[in-house]
């Protein structure tokens, strides 16, 4: 995927990557999960904890994911190779606002930053 793709194509592509991270079967394919995270990745969780790349990968690969759906997905292209994605994630028991900062490197999109905030 090129960073110069049309906005609708880029939105669909990043939506699929975000959905991949929320999918319950994400543990089954580590080879596609790990490259999604940039080396300098940081995450501010809904719990208030801060994770780096290795910590979030460990949690994702060991946790039992709850099925989640994405609503109101929107992207804002901040530069040719930088995109902010925002959306609402819903599980059976909770809802949260999410924001992700993606960058295009090494011929692929990588997640640099993610934050989840409990929705009221």
Image: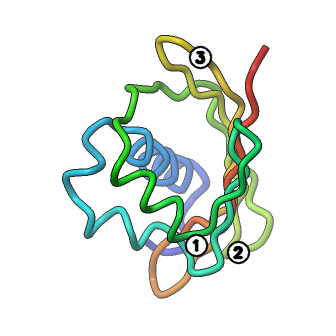
In the image, what residue occupies the spot 58% across and 65% down?
111
Whichever of callouts 2 and 3 sits on the residue coming sooner in the sequence is 2
Q: Please report contact status of discs 2 and 1: CB closer than 8 Å, yes or no.
A: yes
Q: Identify the residue position indicated by label 1 in the image.
A: 4
- Under circle 3, the secondary element is loop
Instruction: Look at discs 2 and 3 and give the one toward the viewer.
Output: 3
- How far across and how far down the image is residue 10, in percent? 54, 56
Q: Quadrant of residue 102?
A: bottom right
- How far across and how far down the image is residue 116, in percent? 70, 40
Q: Residue furthest left?
A: 28
The correct choice, above or below, for 88 with respect to 109 in the image is above
- How far across and how far down the image is residue 97, in percent? 71, 31
Q: Residue furthest bottom?
A: 106
In the image, what residue occupies the spot 73% across and 51% down?
44
Spatial separation of the CA atoms under disc 2 and disc 1: 7 Å
Q: Residues within 10 Å of mark 3 (few under 14, many from 20)?
A: few
The correct choice, above or below, for 77 with respect to 74 in the image is below
- Nearest the camera: 33 or 75? 33
- Relative side of 11 to 23, left or right: right
Whichever of callouts 1 and 3 sits on the residue coming sooner in the sequence is 1
The correct choice, above or below, for 12 with respect to 94 in the image is below
Spatial separation of the CA atoms under disc 2 and disc 3: 34 Å
Whichever of callouts 2 and 1 sits on the residue coming sooner in the sequence is 1
Q: Residues within 10 Å of mark 1 (few under 14, many from 20)?
A: few
Q: Identify the residue position indicated by label 3 in the image.
A: 94
In the image, what residue occupies the spot 46% across and 76% down?
108
In the image, what residue occupies the spot 26% across and 70% down?
31
- How far across and how far down the image is residue 22, in percent? 43, 39
């Amino acid at each position: 995927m090129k960073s110069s793709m049309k906005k609708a194509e880029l939105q669909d592509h990043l939506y699929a990557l975000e959905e991949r991270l929320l999918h319950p079967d994400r543990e089954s394919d580590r080879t596609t999960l790990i490259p999604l995270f940039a080396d300098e990745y940081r995450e501010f969780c809904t719990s208030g904890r801060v994770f780096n790349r290795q910590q979030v990968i460990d949690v994702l690969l060991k946790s039992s994911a709850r099925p989640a759906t994405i609503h109101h997905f929107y992207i804002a292209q901040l530069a040719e190779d930088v995109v902010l994605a925002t959306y609402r994630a819903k599980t059976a028991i909770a809802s949260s606002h999410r924001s992700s900062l993606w960058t295009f490197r090494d011929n692929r999109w990588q997640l640099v930053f993610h934050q989840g905030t409990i929705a009221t």
